[in-house]
Every structure is written in structure tokens, then in C-alpha cells.
Image (cartoon, rainbow, N blue to C red):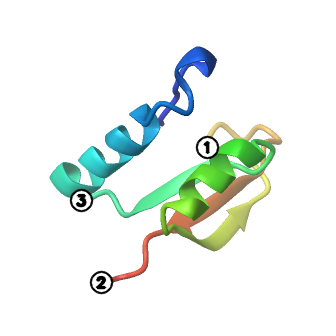
Amino acid sequence: MLFVHEQARGQGLGTALTDYVIKHHAVSEVDVNEQNPQAVGFYLSRGFQQVGRSEMDGSDLPYPLLHLRLPEA
């Protein structure tokens, strides 16, 4: 999970962290709370594409998740 404090948003920290885990840890898939449009927009703007959706989160709570993946290069 990636969380950036509200006061630090818009300063490139989220992009730097995302770029780092993609490059150094081969992250290519993320799950994002559908009810957080700012987070969804962040990942979509970085090239992730929606590949699925779940009604419940990993704890079986009613928080729908969008499954996002980077397209293969």
C-alpha cells in the first residue's frame, strides 16, 4: 500500500515511490480502493489499466477494489 500524507501530496513523492517499486521490486499490479478517486486517478495517470474489480477488500469488508496492472512493455 502507498499512502502519502495530505500535506505532502503534489510534490512528486508518490510518483518517486511508485517509480522506485516498479524499477527495483518489479511491481506491476496494484489494488486501489474504488471509493478513492484521487488514488485511482494517480495510478491511471501513471499508465496502470483496470483489469478487474472486487466487491470486498482483502479483509472481506465492503470496500470495492479496482485491480490495476501496468501493460507489458
Q: Which mark is residue 22?
A: none
Q: Which residue is mark 1?
A: 58
Residue 68 position (above or below residue 11): below
Which residue bears the numbered disc 2? 73
Front tag of 1 and 2: 2
Q: Secondary structure at mark 3?
A: loop
Name the residue nearer the viewer: 52 or 5: 5
Residue 27 placement (x, y as % from top left): 32, 57
Q: Quadrant of the C terminus?
A: bottom left
Which residue is drawn at the image coordinates 59% and 63% (left, top)? 44
Q: Amino acid at mark 1?
A: Gly
Given the image, on which type of amino acid does mark 2 rest?
Answer: Ala
Residue at image location 45% in from the left, 37% down from the top: 14
Q: Outermost residue toward the bottom?
A: 73
Q: Residue at x 25, y 45 (%)?
A: 20
As drawn, is 59 to the left or to the right of 71? right
Q: How much space separates mark 2 and mark 3, taking CA atoms?
A: 12 Å
Find residue 7 and report its horizontal and vertical position in percent: 59, 15
Q: Which residue is mark 3?
A: 26
Q: Position of residue 9 (x, y in %)?
A: 56, 28
